[in-house]
Image (spheres, rainbow, N blue to C red):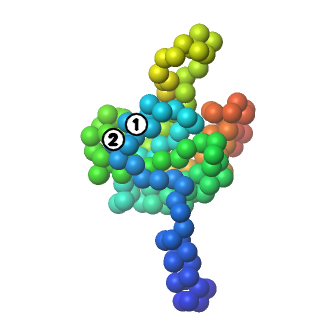
């Protein structure tokens, strides 16, 4: 790849709208109460090698599931209080969250509740992220590649 192609690639990457957005602890609190879509949270740090390596995979999975699943990120160094509240002990940590639904809650008017479907410490690739979302949020069988 020539230097001009690299510069164009970097420019395109930096101006492209991110789907998986960084949020503050306060923003996360609001998102956890809104529950409009299933949510995948990536707790990361900028100095963490596996976090940096997984970041483009996380963004690609967010693009693939845009409109169906919300992907967000929280920097555990900037938001240490929230990281502590979420019991983040290893990086990256992924939380797969969905609205809790039971037959009695259909029209009760109560606030939606989120339930943790899975917690994973360690980086995942795009294919695995998508497969886990399909399983946890849309009833697809557990991915064979993870058995």
Is residue 139 depicted above or below 82 in this figure? above
Q: Position of residue 98 (x, y in %)?
A: 55, 31
Q: Position of residue 42 (x, y in %)?
A: 46, 47
- CB within 8 Å, label 2 to label 1: yes
* Image vertical order of residue 128 relative to residue 34, above or below: below
Residue furthest to the top? 104
Relative to residue 8, is residue 145 drawn left or right? Answer: right
Identify which residue is drawn at 59% across, 10% down.
Answer: 104
Q: Residue at x 54, y 55 (%)?
A: 19
Q: Quadrant of residue 60?
A: bottom right
Instruction: Please give left or right for residue 110 compared with residue 141 in the image.
Output: left
Q: In the drawing, what numbered circle is on residue 53?
A: none
Cα gap from disc 2 to disc 1, whole angstroms: 7 Å
Does the rendering let one see residue 120? Answer: no
Q: Residue at horizontal 47%, vertical 53%?
A: 21
State the residue in front, 24 or 124.
Answer: 24
Label 1 Cα crowd, 10 Å radius (few <14 / some 14-19 / many 20+): few
Residue 36's x, y, as percent? 55, 35
- The quarter of the picture where the C terminus appears is top right
Residue at 56 percent across and 89 percent down: it is: 4
Mark 2 surroundings: few (<14), some (14-19) or many (≥20) residues within 10 A: few
Q: Which numbered tag is attached to residue 30?
A: 1
Q: Is residue 108 left or right of residue 131?
A: left
Q: Which residue is mark 2?
A: 26
**Quarter holding residue 45:** bottom left
* Helix, strand or loop status at disc 1: helix
């Amino acid at each position: 790849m020539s230097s001009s192609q690299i510069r164009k690639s970097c420019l395109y990457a930096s101006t492209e709208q991110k789907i998986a957005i960084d949020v503050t602890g306060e923003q996360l609190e609001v998102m956890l109460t809104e529950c409009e879509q299933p949510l995948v949270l990536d707790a990361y740090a900028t100095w963490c090698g596996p976090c940096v390596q997984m970041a483009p995979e996380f963004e690609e999975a967010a693009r693939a599931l845009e409109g169906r699943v919300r992907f967000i990120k929280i920097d555990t160094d900037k938001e240490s209080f929230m990281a502590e509240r979420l019991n983040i002990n290893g990086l990256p940590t992924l939380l797969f969250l969905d609205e809790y639904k039971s037959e009695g809650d259909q029209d009760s008017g109560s606030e939606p509740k989120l339930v943790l479907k899975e917690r994973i410490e360690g980086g995942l690739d795009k294919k695995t992220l998508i497969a886990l979302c399909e399983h946890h949020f849309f009833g697809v069988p557990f991915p064979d590649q993870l058995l």
